[in-house]
Amino acid sequence: MAQTLVEKILAAHRIAGEAVPGRELAIRIDQTLTQDATGTMAYLQFESMGLDRVKADLAVSYVDHNTIQVGFENADDHAYLKSVAQRYGIVFSRPGNGICHQLHLERFGRPGATLLGSDSHTPTGGGIGMLAIGAGGIDVAVAMGGGPFYLTYPKVTLVRLTGRLPPGVSAKDLILRVLAEYGTNGNVGRVLEYGGPGVATLGVPARATVTNMGAELGVTTSVFPSDEVTRAFLRAQGREGDWTAWAADEGAVYDRVLEVDLGGLEPLAACPHSPGNIATVASLAGRRVNQVLIGSCTNSSYRDLKTVALMLRGKKVHPDVEVGVAPGSRQVVEMLAREGLLTDLVLAGVRILENACGFCIGNHMSPGTDAVSLRTSNRNFEGRSGTRSAQVYLVSPETAAAAALTGVFTDARTLALAEPVAEPEAFARDDSLFLFRETAGRGVPGAAIVRGPNIGTVPSGKPLPERLDGVAAIKVGDKITTDHIMPAGARLKYRSNVPQYAKYVFEPVDAAFFANASANRDAGLHNVIVAGESYGQGSSREHAAMCPMYLGVRAVVAKSIERIHLANLINFGIVPFAFADPADYEGVAQGDRLAVEGLRAAVAGDGRAVVRNLTRGTEFAVAVALTDRQRTLLLNGGLLAAVACGAVC
Ligand code: MIC
Ligand code: SF4
């Protein structure tokens, strides 16, 4: 039978389970990646598994998020990550090398392979024809150790592209168009596969922009075929040997098809405060702009930044606009420098930022009060920029450059380059900031691991109690992101220290949560989180489950929960219940005393339970659909606890 590309890659990696949408499938993972903000916990968990080396074909540890180094914490993390990499056979990408997803695409990604990364934008690798998936750190630790990754067998949507992008319109406008169609919730359990004649007109970095921001849809991943364009990209990276052709069979059947004529696209923007809140730039034209930031793992390639440099060449940025450019990697910096394009940017008045996540995660370049900030990154959740009142819009590099010049939203088609920037025949290559390549996969047994005072321990979970006796410690609305649950920005440096980081759980929503939840826990009560639709959108950070677990959270009751966060909750022993009737959400208030008799029995059985609201004298039904493996994890108090007691290996 004719197969989709997704079916082919999954079939080639299947270990167990059925190829039936909705069922659980176990797959082999070829490559793993971590970044520093999730990496320290991932490696602490890997260490606790007692293995002597990594077993995946390739494991890479990147440092790109916490590079600001105010205080000792970031540097402690870097030293720990470096020493772990040496010891266990992991390639270590030093700070200064670039952003994990851009670097992985350039130097390691392989068509047809599977990649699991402890970052939600790992699907960037889909631009090169990989099946690249984001997950919590502990799932990546298991995959590094050679264990399978479990996913729900997906439904596959075909995005069929025709035509060619017009001047001034680029890949960002395509993914914003897809976001306008499908929104940021309700897409769990799907993969987007791109196909059609328009695919051949898009270079690999453009494809990667599209698969990167598939994360904002909430899909498991997105993937492009591997074709002659992919081959040319790998050749230009000196890696043609890694190329193989991958495409869907003629006549493959899809669950859904979205037709997009690239020629009919126009510049778009994701408006505050959601990547799914799409408007045309033309409809915003003339509105003032205070800040323009270009970079992040979505749009920091050579092609993107050369386009910006050429648009700014010989001109000056508007005096009322602060403009920054953060290249994606050293390769990009080197090529911009060699071609004089950095000079163009500097002379135009651009601030050149470090080739790292930087502004995207809100730990620097925060905008001023009420400022309008145009960014080429992928998320504009309220407060993520570091400034609560800022209005962040997500746009293409072309739209960003146009606003940098004019000081207002401007349709980039009016300032487009006469000739689009072509992909180079050869990229500059210097792999000297990748360490331990020679011992990759083997490691250096006995090499010392460096643990500064910022390196904490992973909290261990306790078995699920027979009965839930708790409090609705917080009630939140729809689309609560992991940035709401576990803020990054200025708090990011506490990632390796759970007791410290736990002080900021739900800080942007309810600053009293830590005190209240700690008091409940200390009084022997369980904490429960009550939430609306699409709880846990956004990042893969497992701290959004680990820190609540540390504060005694044993259950979430939500209208719906996003994929990575749901897996993280189970990995940390928190039961992810859904309201059987979403209308019951209205009948619970923050502070209500809640009880579930037979909590263990419900999890061990069909997942159905009744929650008694002791404060109001009411009750409502909840349910959780679990596989046997997930039941075992929850009953034992999470994945690490289940491994420790031998319930899973
Ligand atoms: C993000 O973009 O939100 C992050 C920071 O890269 C996260 C990972 C993290 O929280 O460390 C992600 O996307 O998974
Ligand atoms: Fe880094 Fe931003 Fe990409 Fe997350 S989305 S990996 S913070 S550049």
Image (tube, grey):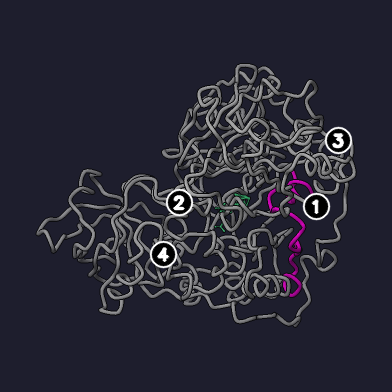
Q: Is residue 592 magenta?
A: no
Q: Which residues are magenta?
A: 85-110
Q: Earlier in the sequence, mark 1 or mark 2?
A: 1
Residue neighbourhood size for the residue with mark 1, other residues' Cα within 10 Å, grouped as few (<14), some (14–19), many (≥20): many
Q: Would residue 240 be seen by someone viewing this image from the given angle?
A: no
Write down the residue under mark 4.
505
The CB of the residue at mark 1 lies under 8 Å from ligand 2: no
Q: Looking at the picture, which amino acid does disc 1 mark?
A: Arg
Q: CA distance from mark 4 to mark 2?
A: 17 Å
Write down the residue under mark 2.
388
Q: CA distance from mark 1 to mark 4?
A: 35 Å
Q: Looking at the picture, which amino acid does disc 3 mark?
A: Pro
Q: Position of residue 331 (x, y in %)?
A: 82, 49
**Residue 567, placed above or below residue 318:** below
Instruction: Say left or right for 164 vs 151.
Output: right
- Residue 330: assigned label: 1
Q: Looking at the picture, which amino acid does disc 4 mark?
A: Val
Disc 1, disc 2: CB below 8 Å? Answer: no
Q: Quadrant of residue 581?
A: top left
Residue neighbourhood size for the residue with mark 2, other residues' Cα within 10 Å, grouped as few (<14), some (14–19), many (≥20): some
